[in-house]
Amino acid sequence: MTNSADLDRLRWSWSAEAVGRLRSRLRGTSEVWESPDLAHVMVLGDSQVGKTTLLLRLLGVTDPVRAAEAARPLRAGQGRGKPATPVPVRYQWSGAPDHWSLVHGAQRPAEWLTSLQMEHRLASFRGGAGADRLRWESRDRPLEIGLPDRFAGPEPRVNLRVFDLPGLHAAGPQEREAVKALVAGYASVMDHVVFVLPADQFAEVVRDPVITENPFLAGWGEQPERFSLVFTRAFSGESVRRHLLSVLGPPGSPAWSRDRVVETVQRHYDGQLRVSELPSGNPDALFPVDIGDSWHELLRSDRSYAEAVAPACEVLLRHLSGTVARYSGTDRRYLAAPEIATRVEIVVQDNRRRRRAALGAARQTWREAKKAHAEALRLMAEAEASAEAARERMRLLLRSLDRLSRWPVPYKRPGRPEMKGHSVRAKQEEERTAWTEAARKAWEKWRNKYRDPAVPRLPPHDLSTKTREYYDELCGCCGQCESEWWKWRRWRSNTPDHCYGLMTAVDEGMRTRIRSALHAHAASATTRVSGIVAKAEQRCLLASRYVELTAQEVADAKSALDVLHEQAAEQQAEDAGNLAVVRSVRAVHDEENETYVRRLLCRAAASAGDERAWLFLAALRGVHDLNRMFP
């Protein structure tokens, strides 16, 4: 026999069926479908801004002494100024009066711990120098911590599950990457997100890339129903005090009513959002408070001011608790089914943004690769032209050297001397000078015709000495005709005519020797020009390799761009299909609800008595739930 408890368990079965149908038809939107039982509310903010104290208050720990006692093990032995939350944690009540519950690991058995054991257990999740290394992986499920029931206040307790993450500005690089991965994975499935912001640095926190780059968090200013902003140390700041005094007068005056203080401080921070060029518009979604250490500091520094703002701070905390409590009911997740379409649309929009960014980056890479390839081709052309110019320079030099080896030596012989020994001997010096001058003129004429800077501008420095040596060697003069010519005349049969004939015979030999000397002097340029040719050809080789490299980079960039275009086309089709699916959210729920209601009515028609009444009521409740879901 069916009773009310059975019908309560099946109350939302039709919605679960509808969601299952939609999920089976959607592609690439797994982040929208994370377990709805994980948590209702996520607390997100920097470390050391009062997150732990705030989440304890949200759970229902209202007594300051009990809150401090509960916070001690949750700090995991970390002192002030260090992150208290080493790993992602889901907080709830343990159900035991004096013991904490801790669930961790693949099998996830519950551990029951005392406060000291819990502190040590949480501390074990940190390790390494400076407690920077997390002993936790982003793919692991979060810890589940249950608070002992003795910490609960006298007010009715809400069965709330609060998800807390390591601070945005985490202890080290590994923790920062872990936080980013965690937020990306869980932000989409939270019913409500509470940003906990230091009142003097709130703009920096909400502009953190962890928030701005997450599509489910970036629109916090446009979805006030999903986000609350808590400003901690809100009453402690000097600017807030001055504002309250200027608007309400001195503390204790009639204007300092609880509601006036709440309204004034909320409007003040709404104005601060506008000044910081951040979204604003609903002051009721702002909760400026002082809690934990900052509240105790405020009491010690200015008790009268603290007592004046205490009622406003308390009502803001109660209002915040009421706001998040609305998302703790068992019906909330099912009634939020229409949000599936919104969440899928957010994913689609983020996909589009990522595709545009990826395609833009790929196009830019391709353009830069083509630009680099064009530059490489230009350098290659320059290198080839330079190499060819160097080779042509070498060819011209070799041709000029070849011409130099046959270059005319403009020797003008002095007149014939008197055929006497001493006269002939003296004439040799004139001829030596004439040959030296002829060699110099030959060099100058050749050098003026071939002006390559690698060729020495001046003739050999020892040209005069070498020319005289060549002349003396070829002439073979004995020198006797000048000092003892009469002996030479008497005892030798050779006459001055004979000696002059020897002087005449050096002509061809002198020309050959002079050309050789000039050629050897000019040929030193071939070494320098050969080096220039070698460098130019090496530059050509390097330029050719650079051309090949840039050509490959162009091909790779184009291939990557083509792949992205193909993937983008597939993803666009997938996104279009997903949008078509979510447009049918209402129709699918209508169908499943109708099937559920008809089934109940058929069972009611075949039943009698109380069971029949229960089934009719369940059918009516099903229709009512559908109308609540889609008003």
Image (cartoon, rainbow, N blue to C red):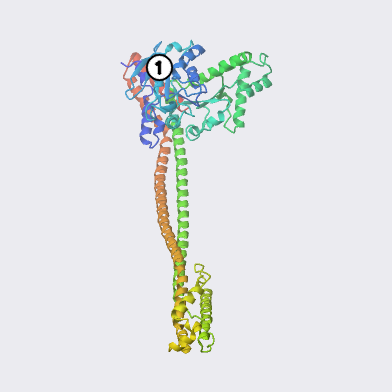
Total residue callouts: 1
Question: Can you give x and y, in whole percent of width and height, for residue 212 in the image?
Answer: 50, 34
User: Closest to the observer: 250 or 538?
Assistant: 538
Q: Is residue 573 above or below residue 240?
A: below
Q: Left or right of 300: which side holds 159?
A: left
Task: Give the quadrant of the N terminus.
Answer: top left
Front-lying residue, 253 or 198? 198
Would residue 494 be seen by someone viewing this image from the given angle? no
Judge whether residue 448 can be spotted in this image: yes
| Vertical side of 444 occupied by 554: above or below | above
Q: Secondary structure at mark 1?
A: helix
x, y percentage for residue 414? 54, 85
Name the residue type under label 1.
Answer: Met
Disc 1: which residue: 118
Going 39% across and 32% down the picture, which residue do you hit?
Answer: 588
Q: Is residue 125 above or below residue 388?
A: above
Query: Where 52 sits versus 404, above or below?
Result: above
State the residue in front, 436 or 610.
436
Residue that appears at 47% across and 41% down: 353
Image spot of residue 73 (x, y percent): 44, 17
Q: Quick one: label 1, few (<14), some, or many (20+) residues within 10 Å?
A: many
Q: Give coordinates of residue 529: x percent, y percent.
A: 46, 66
Q: Quadrant of residue 149?
A: top left
Tell which of 517 and 598 is nearer to you.
517
